[in-house]
Amino acid sequence: MQRLVAAEGSALRWLADLRQIGFVSKYSVLRDRLRTSGRLEVQMSFDEITDLLPGGLPPSAYRYDAWWNNEDDPGSTHSQSRLGWMAAGYTAAADRAAQQVVFTRIAG
């Protein structure tokens, strides 16, 4: 049973890694926009991101700071960061009151 659980965990991490490097998700268009920007910082309004994403930003992006956490762990449930800005090599700093986000390229 332990081997099965370990194998399943490895498979899930492998799939998450594949998605991060180029598979399509709701956040792929944001990832691609950041990757092709060529800029160290990209500032976007929530409206700009809503217009970019299929289905727009979810209500939780407007309500919770945690939605904008920078998480790239394959086990994270925050696909927006893992498959969006972190996959593009950026971190996000959101100002929910101003409805603005600054994406900053990760040094390296």
Image (cartoon, helix red, strand yellow):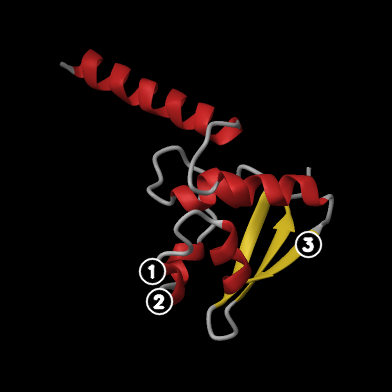
What residue does disc 3 label?
Answer: 41
Q: Position of residue 94 (x, y in %)?
A: 59, 72
Horizontal side of residue 83 vs 45, given as left or right: left
**Which amino acid type corresponds to the residue marked 1 in the rendered image?**
Ser
- Contact flag, marks 1 and 3 (Cβ < 8 Å): no
What residue does disc 2 label?
Answer: 63
Mark 3 vs mark 2, CA separation in Å: 24 Å
For image coordinates 67% across by 44% down, the residue present is: 32
Horizontal side of residue 33 vs 17, given as left or right: right
Tell me the element at label 3. Answer: strand
In depth, the one of 45 and 81 nearer the eye is: 45
- Contact flag, marks 1 and 2 (Cβ < 8 Å): yes
Mark 1 vs mark 3, CA separation in Å: 24 Å
Q: Residues within 10 Å of mark 1 (few under 14, many from 20)?
A: few
What residue does disc 1 label?
Answer: 60
For image coordinates 78% across by 46% down, the residue present is: 36
Tell me the element at label 1. Answer: helix
* Vertical relation: 45 (above or below) 57: below
In depth, the one of 6 and 80 nearer the eye is: 80
Q: Position of residue 57 (x, y in %)?
A: 47, 64
